Amino acid sequence: MNTIGKNFWVTLRIVLGLIFLYSALNSIFGFTGEGPGWINGGGSPTFGYLNFAAYGPFAGIFKAMAGNPIVDILHVGGQLLIGISLLLGVGLRIAGYAGALQMMLIYLSAFPPPFNPILDEHIVYAIVLVGIAVLRPGEVLGLGKIWSEMEVVKNYPILQ
């Protein structure tokens, strides 16, 4: 891949990392002023969305998960770890696939999308995250090279 292509994927990696990290920190600390964060007594970070915004053929499944502490931990913890991984450029294979899975679940919670019969931003994010998982652009502005040389990462390629 040429330098422009590498820089493009590095930029996507960092931008998505910031999106995931901010979303997790906002759920934890409540930056947006929509109420207190999870840590400040704001309650379940997934309850409002899953209970009131989920619609479509899969809504019942997602509404049943609303307010479940395990779902809260998986959602917010996943966003936090994916964001950190993308920003540092380490563990991009698992972060990319996990992020794509999370985006697909959010997509299915509100299917069909309101402005397009098939596509929305969650599909675009998922595609980009799979690209990051495959191409692993962590060596530029990241710790990917150091990470990939670690013995545990060599022994377990999913950690790359």
Image (cartoon, helix red, strand yellow):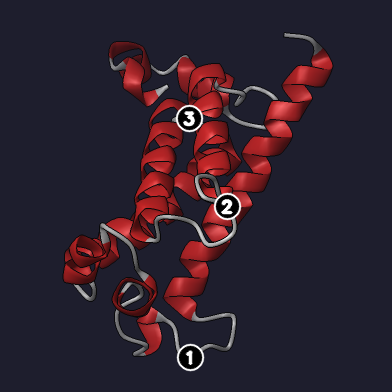
Classify mark 3: residues with Cα within 10 Å, few (<14), some (14-19) or many (20+).
Answer: many
- The disc label shown at residue 70, or none: none
- Furthest residue toward right: 4
Task: Choose mark 2 or mark 1, whichever is in front.
Answer: 2
Q: Quadrant of the N terminus?
A: top right
Q: Are marks 2 and 1 in contact (CB under 8 Å)?
A: no
Q: CA distance from mark 2 to mark 3?
A: 30 Å
Q: Which residue is mark 2?
A: 116
Say what secondary structure mark 3 lies in. Answer: helix
The residue under the point 62% across, 24% down is 137
Work out whether 84 lies above or below 37.
above
Residue at 48%, 30% in the rendered image:
92
Q: Could you tell me if the residues under marks 2 and 3 are in contact, i.e. CB atoms within 8 Å? A: no
- Tag 1: amino acid: Gly
**Mark 2 vs mark 1, CA separation in Å:** 31 Å
What residue would you read off at disc 1?
35
Residue 93 spot, x, y in % from top left: 43, 26
User: Which residue is label 3 attached to?
Assistant: 92
Indicate which disc, 2 or 3, sits on the residue closer to the N terminus.
Answer: 3
Q: Position of residue 148 (x, y in %)?
A: 47, 17
